[in-house]
Structure formats: C-alpha cells, structure tokens
Image: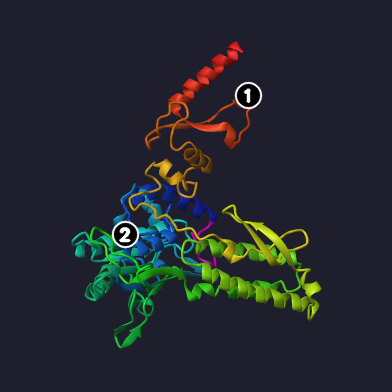
Amino acid sequence: MKKAGIGIPTIQDRARQALVKSALEPEWESRFESTSYGFRPGRSAQDAIARIYSSINKGEYYVLDADIAKCFDRINHDYLLSKIHCPSCLKRDLKQWLKAGVLDNGVFEDTESGTPQGGVISPLLANIALDGMIRFIETMYPKKANRAQATVIRYADDFVVISPSLEIIEQCKTAISERLKPVGLEIKPEKTRICHTFKPIEYEGRTEEPGFDFLGFNIRQYPAGKYKSGKTGGMASRLIGHKTHIKPSQKAVAHTEVIKGVIKQFKTAPQSTLINKLNPIIMGWSNYYSGVVSTETFTKLDKTIWQMLRAWTVSRCGKASHEKLRNYFRHGTIKLSNGKERHENWLFQTKDGLHLFKHNWTPIVRHTLRRPDATLYDGNWTYWASRKGRAIDTPNRVAKLLKKQKGRCTWCGQFFTPSDLIEIDHIVPRSQGGKDDYKNIQLLHRHCHDDKTALDEEMMLYS
C-alpha cells in the first residue's frame, strides 16, 4: 500500500520491507559480483573509485562511461521475480509491493514495472535485477596473459567499462544494451560516452577529451617525466610516461553554490548560527574527497569561501575596518584530526572559540580498497573491524575491541574465527564496581568467558 498523493510506502510497509531485506541480503551478498558497489553494505563510492584506479594506473585504456535510463522505474517485474528463490510468503510480499500502484490526488495508477519508490528494499531489488551484467562481459572477454580485456565497475545504475581496445569497448556497449533488454532497461544515450584515459580521440564526429567523471570524481591520466611516471609493474616493469590522477570533478566543485546559498539565507543571523550550518556541509564534502588528489581543490575552495564571508561581514557593518573585521576573523590554533596543530591568522571564529572548518584541514589519506571477495556477512569480524576502526554490521564496540585485541581472545590467546561464539566480558565485574567502558571490557570466546565467570565467582566466595 502506498501513501496517498506521494507514492511512498507507509511505515508498516517499510518495516516489513526491512525484515524481508534482512532475510534476502546475506544470500545475495555472497552471490553479487565483486566489482559492483552501489547500495551494498560494507562498500562505498570510494571503493569503486579505488577499483578504477587499480585498473588503469599501469597503462592507457579506452572507457565506456554509461548510465542506465530510469533504472528504478523500468525494471521488469517478471524478470526480477524469476531470479529470486525464496519462500512463497516472501515472494508474495515482493510481488504485492511491486504491483501496489500509486494513489495520486485520488487517481490510482498501476505499477507495471519498476521497484517501489522510496522503498527500503528497492536498492537490493535493483542490484538483483542488474546482477550478472559484469559476469556476462567477463565471460565474453576473459583474461589474456593475466591481463583483463574488459573490466566493468558498477555503482547502482552507473557503470564504466575499461579496456585497452576500442573495438572491445564498442562491442561491450552493444552486448550490455542487449543484456539489459530482458530486464526492461536501456542505456541512456545522452549520458553515454566513449573516451580515452590519456589522449583525446575522434569518435562519431566529435573530439572526446581525455578522462571521464564518475560519482563526482574526475579520472584522468597526465603526461609525467621519469621521476613521476607510473610503471607497468611485473618483472619487466617499465615507465609508461604518464600518471593517473583522480580529483573532484568540476560539477562537484560547484558545491560552493550550496555554501553561497546558506550564507545568503543566514545573512542577518548570528555568526555562530552560520558556522553551525556550514560546518557539516564543508566537513562532509571534504571527507568524501579526502582519499584522492584534492589538496589544490580544497585550497581554492577555502579562498572562495573566505571571499564570500568577507562580503557577509561587509553587509553587516558596511565598509569594515581592520578592527571591525577582527570581530569575525581571529587568530587561532586548531588541532587537526591527525593530531597536528595548525595556526590560522584569519580564522572565521566567534568570541567563544567556535570556528568555521576549512576544507584543507582534512588530511589526504588514500582509501584502502576493500577485498573483492569480502562480504559483510562472511563472519570475518577482524577484517571488518580493521576498516577505519569499525565494522558496519557488527556493533561498534565489538569491532573496536577486535582491533584493540588484534583479533585474539585475551583469556586463551587464540585468534577468533568467523565460526567462534564470542562474549563481551567485564574485566572487573560490575558487581565489584567495574565500569562499562572500553578500559574495562574485553572479548572472549564463549567457553573462555564461562571459565572466567566461574573463576570470578569462586574468587568472590573466598574473598
């Protein structure tokens, strides 16, 4: 059932969809292709970009950059349901959600194709429908001499195909178009482009500039001398004469328009209010691009925003003198997330010390590519805990403890395995005044926990 006038599932349906999703997702996560990343737990846009980098950084490649037109609206219901093998009660629910229809201003419309708009389960269903496209290309063009002829990297309905051969790229475009027809989908022509990573090419009467944009990143190769050039790798490694750079795309850098709009909206608001509104925007954007070549972009953005804030102060106090500006811009020492301190002379800061975050305070740290065969449901908690100090599907406390203990049980000293039953144990029992914080908890095997509990109880009897 859809919410009237909007076409969005009701709260009851969302809860039911989340339950069905939790039943279907573990099986499909073990079956999904290794280079699909969108709407999958434990995978991110940064993983997709890192996979592209590892695929092109040792040579020159042609690229098919494509987008599937109205993916969520056109998926064939019969095709999708035929791929899902589950108990009949779950399949019945899936069919009802797909066929529920939309009630808009009192007018009911059937939904003959597509997944529920705003549905919790819709991203999973879209991934199920598109699963097999990457394997299809890999089967058509298997590796030769341990080198991939065609690599497909997909993030939801956006994908790229990478190949050293223009002919293979063109064949992949045709093959994928045919492969999508039974699914009810097609490639969007106006968002499909064939280009080269390093040099401009003439294609279909147009000059295609080198490089391409994907997920807000610009991926391109630039000429480089022998000291900065990439290498082919392997035993007979040689210089390739260029370097692969990934940075924020021009369209993504336009996020300054968002900041400009916020500054305009809070033209008469207190400085602290403006800072609180801008900081989440700047920090979120900076973190998204912190794993690529973004230092120059960050610096330019900070200069642009400084000019915007300078104009904001003028609108409040007229042609400001140096003394008036010091009411808004101050000297300050900032401690960065990497532990380093930074001294700022013209820091947009209140008298209470609340300051505006700058893009270039975000350290550039290369993203660690997720292992292609790892899934969040494989039980390898030690691996997932090592990714930025947290696991996505296990409690943060367990993940941090696994990392802290380096994957070992503190009682028996043995490594935890995915099949082990584990317990969180208080080093000093709470009955004896122990606190529920990280310094006083540890992970133990279930049998070790039982042994320790028995020992603690025995010690209490004799104490």
Helix, strand or loop at label 1? It is helix
Q: Position of residue 350 (x, y in %)?
A: 75, 63
Give the quarter of the image for residue 460: top right
Q: Position of residue 80 (x, y in %)?
A: 33, 60
Residue 162 showing in the rendered view: yes
Q: Is residue 205 above or below residue 291?
A: below
From mark 1 to mark 2, how far is it between C-alphas?
Answer: 53 Å
Task: Give the farthest residue toward the top.
Answer: 462
**Residue behind mark 2:** 131
**Left or right, residue 314 beside residue 337:** right
Helix, strand or loop at label 2? It is loop
**Residue behind mark 1:** 431
Give the quarter of the image for residue 109: bottom left
Q: Is residue 5 magenta?
A: yes
Tell me which secondary structure the magenta stretch mostly adopts.
loop
Q: Residue at the location (74% across, 59% down)?
A: 353
- Density class for disc 1 (Cα within 10 Å; few <14, some 14-19, many ≥20) is few
Q: Amino acid at mark 1?
A: Ser
Q: Which residues are magenta?
A: 1-10
Task: Give the farthest residue toward the front.
Answer: 227
Task: Give the farthest residue toward the bottom.
Answer: 205
Q: Is residue 199 above or below residue 217?
A: below
Q: Residue at the location (61% across, 34% down)?
A: 436
Q: Position of residue 447 (x, y in %)?
A: 43, 25
Q: Amino acid at mark 2?
A: Asp
**Nearest the eye: 292 or 177:** 292
Q: Position of residue 171 (x, y in %)?
A: 23, 73
Q: Residue at the location (40% across, 33% down)?
A: 415
**Nearest the eye: 47 or 106:** 47
Q: Is residue 312 above or below residue 340?
A: below
